[in-house]
Amino acid sequence: MVQDKAKCYSNIKYSLFFIGTIYTLILLFLFLLSGLSARLSLFLASGPFTIPLYLAVVSIGYYLLDFPLNFYQSHILEHKFSLSKQSLSDWLKDQLKTGLISYFIGLILLSAFYLILRYFSHNWWLIISLFWIFFSVILAKVMPVIIIPLFFKYKKLDDEVLRGRVLKLADKMKVKIIDCFQIDFSKKTLKANAAFVGIGNTRRVILADTLKDKYTHDEIEVILAHEFAHYQLKHLLKLIVINSLTTFIIFYIIFKTSYYTLALFGLSSLSDVAALPLICIYFILFAIVTTPFEAFVSRSFARSADS
């Protein structure tokens, strides 16, 4: 019964992801073909404020158009399967935080994109790729100390016996962590989770209180052994290399083909912020093509970590 319910939940989530992807592509194509993107870019033309204003208007517009699907998927469905106890007001607060974080990250990346595009017309794709890779590493480093605390309260694990086992396991598997923490997952969801996050002096283990309270020490140690195995087998480094290569490839494809695709939508140059939806289309289509490969790599790494 539980397995049937879990399978039903997964099938719905996959279906909604597929529907959401197609829906987003349709919105982007309509935004370009209708000329709305070009008119918005022209209307907002205000020197250094064009990019932040354009991104703000488009982000808010997309959020409103996507709200019904997003609300059902991340709030109603979670309650329907008894996986969440988060109130509507708390959900909306998290949505606002997520939106603001996404906006500022997007603004940094886009500002760098257009700045590099302006001064390096022939090899911009290479420089932008390097910047995006560097920025993703910085994000991974600061996520445990800046981003996670915005959504959860976390402290050092108060179960000293379990904490000792985790630290001993990390030492045995030659994984350097600063400590083991717990977060108040239970205030939002009934799901249980554990994470091995951060880079260098921010690397740490984070346990959801739902996991700590409902699973035995042996079970938790097995879960973390799997996560540490990913590190020991250099899966994290391999993923960084794979993601870096895909970043180079997608920007090179844009570099080689944008002349033709821009003409299809009546756009003159990638440097025009009105072409931003076209760049988003490239990334979405590329993700669709590469998803099977990413799933294969993920499953392969998971089996190795299990072993």
Image (cartoon, rainbow, N blue to C red):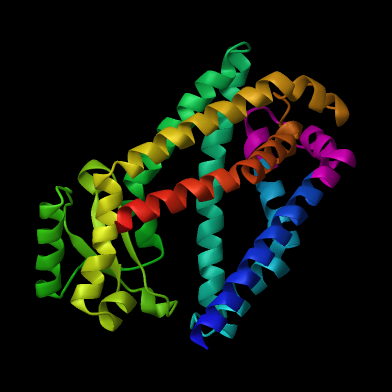
Where residue 187 sits in the image (x, y, percent)? Answer: 40, 79
Q: Residue at x 54, y 35 (%)?
A: 109
Where residue 50 sits in the image (x, y, percent)? Answer: 68, 34
Is residue 53 visible to the viewer in this orientation of the structure?
A: yes
Viewer-proximal residue among 63 and 16 = 16
**Of all residues shown, which one is farthest toward the front?**
307
Give residue 189's quadrant in the image: bottom left
Where residue 266 sits in the image (x, y, percent)? Answer: 88, 28
Does residue 49 belong to the magenta stretch? yes
| Above or below, 187 relative to 127 | below
Does residue 65 belong to the magenta stretch? no
Quadrant showing the C terminus: bottom left
Total tally of numbered discs in the picture? 0
Q: Residue at x 82, y 43 (%)?
A: 29
Where residue 275 sits in the image (x, y, percent)? Answer: 75, 32
Relative to 96, 298 lies left or right: left
| Above or below, 213 relative to 68 | below
What is the chief secondary structure element of the magenta stretch? helix
| Above or below, 302 relative to 31 | below
Which region of the structure is painted magenta? Answer: 29-54
Give residue 162's quadrant in the image: bottom left
